[in-house]
Image (tube, rainbow, N blue to C red):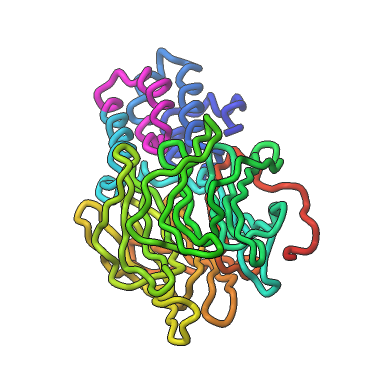
Amino acid sequence: MQVCQNQEFFQLNADQLGKLLSSDDLNVPSEQDVFHSLMSWVRHDSAAREQHIPELLALVRLPLLQPAFIMDHVENVCNANECQQLVMEAFKWHLMPERRSRIATERTTPRKSTVGRLLAVGGMDAHKGAISIESYCPRLDKWTPWKHMTGRRLQFGAAVMEDKLILVGGRDGLKTLNTVESLDLNTMAWAPLNAMATPRHGLGVAVLEGPLYAVGGHDGWSYLNTVERWDPIARTWSYVAPMSSMRSTAGVAVLGGRLYAVGGRDGSVCHRSIECYDPHTNKWSLLAPMNRRRGGVGVTVANGFLYALGGHDCPASNPMVCRTETVERYDPATDTWTLICSLALGRDAIGCALLGDRLIVVGGYDGNHALKSVEEYDPVRNGWNELAPMAFARAGACVVAIPNVIPPAAQQPPPSATV
C-alpha cells in the first residue's frame, strides 16, 4: 500500500480512512499491508487516533492474516473488548475450517488484489503434452504465458509449499516417472528434489501440516494404493499407511487437518468411495460414498466443504464411458454428499483450485477435445459463471494458487507452448 508513504495518507480523518479500508478494490499485496498502514496512521497522532482503533480494526480482514502474525502484531494493540472479539473471530476462522460456511462475514472475503493468481501447469493438448504454464489474474480476468516446465510430464501432481511450486511424478510417453522438481517462486529457478521410491502417474498430491503427500496412481504396471510423504526438512520420502483401495486419477485435497482421497479408478471400476488420512494416527478411514462414480475427478476445498467435479464413470477404455457434468459437495460435519449445480459440459481431467474464496474450474476433456474454458462457482445462486478462457486447451493440467508476494510474471517464454 504505497499510499501510506504519502503525507496525504496521514492527513486523512477517521471517516476517510474507514472508507478506504472498507473497499474491496483497495490495491494492496496482502492484508498485512492494510494492518500496517492502519497502525502507521494511528502512530502519526497516537493521542488523538488510538480511540479509533476498534472501529477501524473492524475494517481489516483479520481472519485472512496468519495466526502467527495476529499473535505477534495484532494482539499487542487490542486492549478494547471490541478488538479482542475481532481477534477471537480470526482465530475461530483458522481453528474451525469445517464451520467456515457458517461463520463467514465480510472480513473473511479477500480483497481482489490480495488473492494472488492461478497457475495452470502442463496438461494434455492437441500436441499431446503441454510444457507451458499459464497465469490467471483475477483482477483483469486474463490469462498470460508465465513459464515452462523443464520437460514433459503428463498425469503428474503439483502443489505449492511456501515459496516453491513442486511437480511430482507423472509420465513422459510410456515411461512413468518418480522424479520431483521444484520452482523457486522468488528466483524462478528450477531445481531437482529427491525422487520418490515408486514411479507414479495419475497420482494425487497435497500438503498437510508441512509435509507433501503423493497418493496412489499407477506405476506403469499396476494401480497403486500406496502413499509416500515428503519431509521438506529432512528432504526425504517415506511410506505412510496405504489406502484401502487402489486409486489412480483420484482427487486429493486437505480439509480440517486430514487428507482426503476421492473417487479415482483401479483396473476394473471407477470408485464412489472416499477415504481420509489422519497423520497423527497414520490411519485411513472410509467415509460416506459419493452419489456417482468418478475417475478423473476434480477435487478442491472451499468454505469448509469438499467439492467433487465432473469425472468419468468407468475406465476410459470402456466404449460405454460417460463423462459427467455433475458436481457434488461433501460436508464433513454430517458425513454427507449433496449434488449442486452442474457444470455446463460433461468432462474429466479437470483442473480446479480455490483462489481467495473463489472455486475455479479449468479445462478438462469432453471425450473429443481438450478444453480451454474456465468457470467459477457462485455459491449464492448455486450457479457457474464463465471466465476468460486459457490461451491453450488443457486436459489434466495441475492448477494451483500462488500468493501475491511472488513475481506475477516470468521472463518472456519461447513462442511454442507445446512439445
Regarding residue 105, the answer to whether it shows in the image is: no
Location of the C terminus (image quadrant): bottom right
Q: Residue furthest front?
A: 221
Give x and y (percent) for residue 159: 53, 48
Tell me the residue at 32%/60% (across/down): 274
Say above or below: 383 vs 53: below
Considering depth in this image, is 90 or 190 the residue closer to the camera? 190
Residue 329 lies in the magenta-colored region: no
Say above or below: 318 vs 131: below
Left or right, 280 with reference to 131: left
Say above or below: 408 vs 62: below
Question: In the picture, residue 110 is in which quadrant?
Answer: top left
Residue 75 lies in the magenta-colored region: yes
Give x and y (percent) for residue 237: 51, 40
Tell me the residue at 42%/41% (across/down): 22
Left or right, 254 with reference to 392: left
Secondary structure mostly seen in the magenta stretch: helix
Question: In the picture, residue 58 is in which quadrant?
Answer: top left
Q: Which residues are magenta?
A: 57-84
Say above or below: 133 vs 187: below
Q: Residue furthest right?
A: 414
Considering depth in this image, is 106 or 10 the residue closer to the camera? 106
Tell me the residue at 19%/55% (across/down): 334
